[in-house]
Image: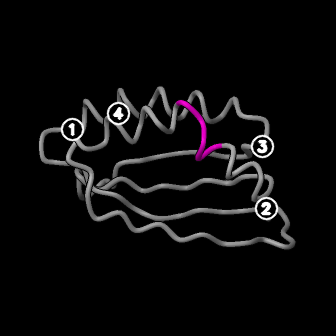
Amino acid sequence: MVILAGTIRVASGKQSAATQVLARLVEATRAEEGCISYSFAFDVLDDRLLRIFEVFRDEAALAAHWASPHMAAWRAEAAGLGVADREIWQYEATSGKQI
């Protein structure tokens, strides 16, 4: 499994627009064969900070996601939302269990 976790910021006043754009991205990504989990959430104390959590079956599934049309659309719209301060970490999970 490949896990991505991190944050990005959107420009002040862009939370509503970002939510609309991200809803399309999340819906399309969750429909991908290799997507296990995919979510974005605004921080409760900072309305510009988006927390990101993604889980993909493997590197091939992640590569397919990055090459998808909905990711291209997100990249094209991100600049208009003032996306900045991107900090995302990638982890490999070799085993795990639900607790």
Mark 1 and mark 4 residues within 8 Å of each other at the beta carbon: no
The residue beneath circle 3 is 34
Cα separation between marks 4 and 2: 27 Å
Assign a secondary structure to mark 2.
loop
Q: Kindly identify which numbered label has been placed on residue 80.
A: 1
Cα separation between marks 1 and 4: 13 Å
Q: Is residue 12 left or right of residue 64?
A: left
Looking at the image, tell me whether mark 3 or mark 4 is earlier in sequence order: 4
Cα separation between marks 2 and 1: 32 Å
Cα separation between marks 3 and 1: 29 Å
Write down the quadrant of residue 34 in the picture. Answer: top right
The residue beneath circle 4 is 19
Q: Report crowding for label 1: few under 14, some 14 to 19, many 20 or more residues within 10 A (C-alpha).
A: few
Q: Residue 43: where, in percent of width, then height? A: 33, 55
The magenta-colored residue range is 65-69
Main SS, magenta residues? helix
Q: Residue 53: where, in percent of width, then height? A: 55, 55
Q: Is residue 68 left or right of residue 61?
A: left
